[in-house]
Amino acid sequence: MGYKVVVAGATGNVGREMLNILAEREFPVDEIAALASRKSLGTEVSFGDKTLKTQDLDKFDFTGWDIALFAVGSEATRIYAPKAAAAGCVVIDNSSLYRYDPEIPLIVPEVNADAIEGYRNKNIIANPNCSTAQMVVALKPLHDRAKIKRVVVATYQSVSGAGKEGIDELWDQTKAIYNPVAEVPPKKFSKQIAFNVIPQIDVFLDDGSTKEEWKMVAETKKILDKSIKVTATCVRVPVFVGHSEAVNIETEEFLDWEEAQDILREAPGVMLVDKREPGGYVTPIECVGDYATFVSRVRQDSTIENGLSLWCVSDNLRKGAALNAVQIAEVLGQRCLKKG
């Protein structure tokens, strides 16, 4: 027997990816519903070899449905997720709304799958921020071996992390560079994103950090280990899909870079591509459409006693959002909602 699955926000980038990945991974679906806001009502979306017409999220009855994957943003989630949960449908939410609620588990299956039992508190599970998800997948096996004390990370995040508006703005501004008659002023981003980098993602906080940087700190602690110290600088770059991160790690025990490579080579969800030669690493354009979190440039940091540096790349629409949500649904089905 399979599950009755809902995808809310099915016409957006992440919602469409959720449908694709459910089909690709052959998630056991008996029945599926694609939901959208009223303005997208009736839009057709693909699920494997099937075509689904979107239904109205506002009028949908979640009673009798098993799992709902939400990709509708915090405001809509605040309205509809509690309704779904109250109807007995387990919500896996991609927004930031519930990530910091101590009663709601924040899950990356390769890292803290056991925490999924906490879904029973509110019938809701939170999906982490895209930049956090890929980083903790790479950190987890190293933490298990040598206990990470501190992480310094600089991110290079693609415009798809800002949704369709971000993608469109990069595309339109890039074209305008070669057509001086057409000017495309920044709307989605604070400054021009084409041929530029912007050291701001989300709003500024009182301490000078941005909310995106705060999210990486808070979520890494909740998912991996509350004792880890994290500092982040999050940067938007003119890349369509794929987040990259330069990660520096300080551990309690010494960990040789070659042993770290061996550990990462066998780690779930990680693909090590690390040759010390030109091109012997993975870039964002190569990770698009892939499930893995790619790790390259593993090396010793000689400036501290127990230090490592590495490069981490992943498709943010997949591991950072849709794939992680589907993986959570898989764990939920295997451990908590077994049928048949």
Image: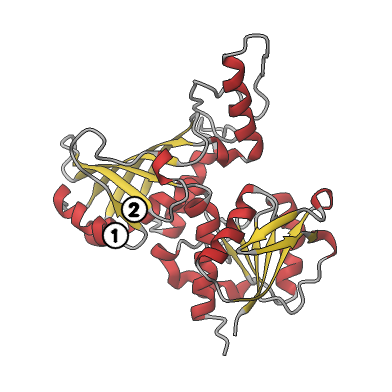
Q: Residue 210: x, y in percent?
A: 53, 35
**Mark 2 is on which residue type?**
Ala
**Mark 1 is on which residue type?**
Pro
Identify the mark at residue 302; answer none if there is no mark. Answer: none
Q: Which residue is mark 2?
A: 138
Does residue 268 appear anywhere in the picture?
A: yes
Residue under the image location 67 percent in, 9 percent down:
181
Q: Residue 84: x, y in percent?
A: 73, 69
Residue under the image location 29 percent in, 59 percent down:
141
**Mark 2: few/some/many CA within 10 Å (<14, 14-19, 20+):** many
Q: Which residue is mark 1?
A: 141
The C terminus sits in image quarter: bottom right
Does residue 95 appear anywhere in the picture?
A: no
- The image quadrant of residue 263 is bottom left
Whether the residues at callouts 2 and 1 have beta carbons within 8 Å, the answer is yes
Residue at the top extreme of this rendering: 180
In the image, is 150 to the left or to the right of 53?
Answer: left
Residue under the image location 61 percent in, 58 percent down:
98
Above/below status of 71 relative to 298: below
Above/below status of 284 relative to 238: below
Residue under the image location 47 percent in, 70 percent down:
115
Local secondary structure at mark 2: helix
Local secondary structure at mark 1: helix
Q: Residue 336: x, y in percent?
A: 54, 80
- The image quadrant of residue 100 is bottom right
